[in-house]
Image: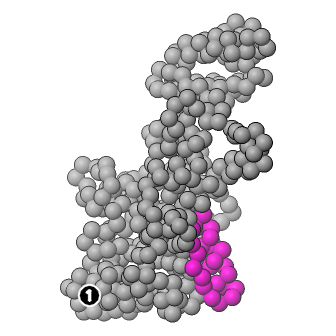
Amino acid sequence: MASPEALHPLSGLRVLDIGREVAGPVCGRLLARLGADVIRVESPGTGDPARRRGPFRAGAAHGESGPLHLYVNEGKRGVAIDLRTASGRDLFLNLVAKSDAVVENFEPRVLGKLDLAYATLAAARPEIVLTSISTFGDGGPYRDYRATELTVFAMGGHMYRSGDAARQPLRMGGWPSQYLVALHAAYATLVALRLAEERGVGQHVTLSIFESQVTAHAQAMVEVSYYAEETGACTPRGAMGLRGVRARDGMAMVTAQEQQMGRLAELVGAPPELGRVDPMNREGGRRALLEHVARWAEGHTKREVYELGQAMHIPASYPADPADLLASPQYRHRGFIESVDHPEAGRVAIPGIPFRWAGSTAPPRPAPRLGEHNAEVFGGLLGLSGAQLAQLAGAGVIA
C-alpha cells in the first residue's frame, strides 16, 4: 500500500523558496500543501521581514510568531543561509543541484548581484525551474521601479472600479495583488516542471504583479477596446449599487434588482406597493423602500440580515471580519480552517487550500523556526558533517 505521502500530487518534488514576505512564500506554501518538499531559505540572524510583522501573542518570541510568517511559511522546512557570502552561495547551489524549482520575488537585479541568476542555477542543475515574481516583470520601462500595494492596486486598474463614483477610489486591504500573483506563480511553476520532466531542460519563468492584477478585471479592458471608443465612457465606479445598512452588531449589505423588489418589501415589512417599480418614480420608490430596509436591519444581527435575505433569494451579505470567517459554518462544514500547534505561538488557525479533489493534501505543519532544519537539510540531504556545520555556523554562513 502506498504511503500517505505518495498520495500527495507533488510528492517527490523539492522546491527552494528564497522569496520575501508574501508573493514568493505564498507560492511556496501552495506547492507545499500539495506535497512538495519546500525548503524555506532565509538570512541568518533576522530571517525574513514577515517574521517581524505583528500582532504577537503575549510571551511569544517576536521573530517566530508573526501571523504573516505563521501562514505563508506553514508546511515548509526552514534553513538559514547568507547568500551574500561565497560559502553560502556554494551551499545554496548544492541544494539547487538536488532540487526541482526555485521561487523568488526579489527585484529583477538582485539575483544577478548575488551571482545566482538563472544561468548559474542551470549550470548546477540543467532541469531547474526558476520562478521569479516582480512588480513590473523583468523588462520594460518600469522594470526597476518600486511600488507598494497601493501603487499596483491603482496602476493595475482595480482602484478605478472600487468604491462610490462620487467619492475617492478605494483599495482593498492586505496584500491582494501579492496573493493573486502567487496563484499564477504556482500554476506557472507546475507547467514549467511538467515541461522540464518531458524535455529534460528547465527554464526561467517570470511574472509581473502589474500584469497579474489586470487578469482579475480584464473584461473592463475588452469593454473599453470596443465600446468606449464610440461612447467615450466605460462602466463607472459604484455601478453595482450595493447598499450598506446598520445591523445590531455591525454593517450588512442589502441590494435587489427590479425583479426582487417585491420580495425585499415582503422581507422588511414594507407596503407592497414599494416593491412594485414605478417607471415615473423609480428612484423615489427605491429610496422609500431602502428606508424600511434600514429600520428592519437595525433589529437584526448582520448574519441574520444575510441569512434571512438569502432565504428570500435576495443577495444580502455582510462585511465579514476575521473572527466571522473563523466561525463560518460553511468553512467548518468543508474543513477549510485547520489548526496547527507552533512551538512559539501555540495553537494557530490556518486556512487550507480552496479546492477539493479525489487526492489528498499534505497535513498542516507549523512554520519553521529560523534555521530549524539546518542539520536535517545540510546533514541529511547534502551529507555535511557536524564539524562542517559548526564551521559554517561559526563563520556566520548558516545559523
Amino acid at circle 1: Leu
Query: Residue 317: within the magenta?
Result: no
Q: Quadrant of the C terminus?
A: bottom left
Q: Residue at x 32, y 89 (%)?
A: 86
Q: Residue at x 66, y 79 (%)?
A: 194
- Which residues are drawn in magenta? 183-207
Residue 386 appears in the rendering: no
Task: Kindly state the secondary structure of the residue where label 1 is placed.
Answer: helix
Apparent side of residue 114 relative to residue 236 in the rendered image (left or right) = left
Based on the displayed image, in which of its 4 quarters is residue 9 positioned? bottom right
Apparent side of residue 103 relative to residue 90 in the rendered image (left or right) = right
Colour setup of the view: one colour
Based on the displayed image, in which of its 4 quarters is residue 80 positioned? bottom left
Give the image location of residue 269, x and y in percent.
Answer: 65, 10
The correct choice, above or below, for 194 with respect to 274 in the image is below
Residue 164 appears in the rendering: yes
Residue annotated with mark 1: 392
Give the image location of residue 218, x and y in percent.
Answer: 68, 52
**Residue at the left extreme of this rendering:** 394
Based on the displayed image, in which of its 4 quarters is residue 197 positioned? bottom right
